[in-house]
Image: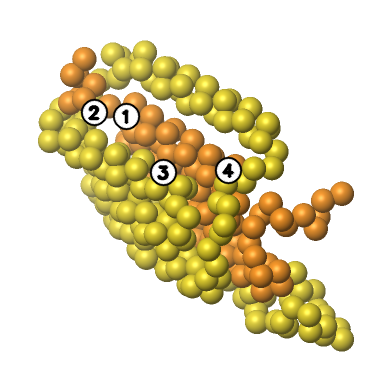
Chain colours: A yellow, B orange
Amino acid sequence: MMTNSASTALLFWLFALMAVGGSVFVITRRNLVSAVMGMVGTFFAIAALYVMLYAHFLAAIQVLVYAGAIMVLFVFVVMILNRSEDEPWAMSGLLGKGLAGIALVYLVARLIGVLWTIKDHAQALPAPGPTVSGNDFGSTQAVGHVLFSSYLFPFEAVSLVLLIAVVGAIAIARPGQKPGHHDPAPTEGERS
Amino acid sequence: MSDIYFHLTISHFLVLAAVLFGIGVVGVLMRKNALIVMMSIEIMLNAANLTILAFARFHGDMGGHALAFVVIAVAAAEAAVGLAIVVAVFRSRRHVDIDRLTSLRN
């Protein structure tokens, strides 16, 4: 991107259309499985946009974690629920949601307006040079170097967060009692 | 005029991220199914990530990549815990309609 080439611009528009269309597809589907499939397409398009931003490693992580792991988890839960909804659109508190929608449209319109007015000053950037560590920008080496030097504490904190999330998810979703069957002493976390 | 179409700048990515975030907000506000709401949250997280990476590219700073990495990991944790809650709610109530989950009201 930002190399003034029309083909990269064409690719950007293609993937932007794919991402926006995919996400609109997701929030309008009544069938949950097709919503998940639209989500996968959206994530692939966003991974392609990451590549255009020289974030190759994060694009790979995006495909692996989002399109791979998280979406498989969603598909599993959809299969467990196996319930189609009769009325998908939430109609309670419509006034507040209408106001929120108007505020959102206003916010996005102002954002686009600001970016539109500064577009003449936003010159195309040259391809990024090597990073401080001497690696290519966005490569796995560069990400690893920055993660294990400047951002070592967030990296380790993330591992702790993931561990806590795994333990918590198992504690919450552990197969408990069927509804109606009252356990004599239900423990915290098993009952919802 | 055709410059906008053939001359990519950081603004293109920022506007795209704003639009994606808006779509995610609409999904969170307007849908009743908890799973669709969670997918909309993932869309919003991805839009934020796109903004972060666009600015990282703009400034030539790898710190944004570290932040985006953390966001992806936290999103994975959020999806795991959120889906566990959805399964637990479905197990006790046989539905995941967030409009009917009013036990904590009042």
Query: Of residues A144 and B99, which is closer to you in this image?
Result: B99
Q: Residues within 10 Å of mark 2 (few under 14, many from 20)?
A: many
- Residue at figure coordinates x 50%, y 43% from the top left: B24
Regarding residue A155, the answer to whether it shows in the image is no
Discs 1 and 2 share one subunit: yes
Crowding at dot 1, Cα within 10 Å, few <14 / some 14-19 / many 20+, comes out as many
Residue at 34% x, 26% y: name it: B11
Q: Are marks 1 and 4 on the same chain?
A: yes
**Chain at tag 2:** B
Alpha carbons under labels 2 and 4: distance apart: 33 Å
Q: Amino acid at mark 4?
A: Met
Q: Are marks 1 and 2 in contact (CB under 8 Å)?
A: yes
Q: Chain of mark 3?
A: A
Residue beneath disc 4: B30
Quarter in which the N terminus of chain A is drawn: top left
Residue B7 seen: yes
Circle 1 sits on which residue?
B12
The residue at which mark 3 appears reads as A24
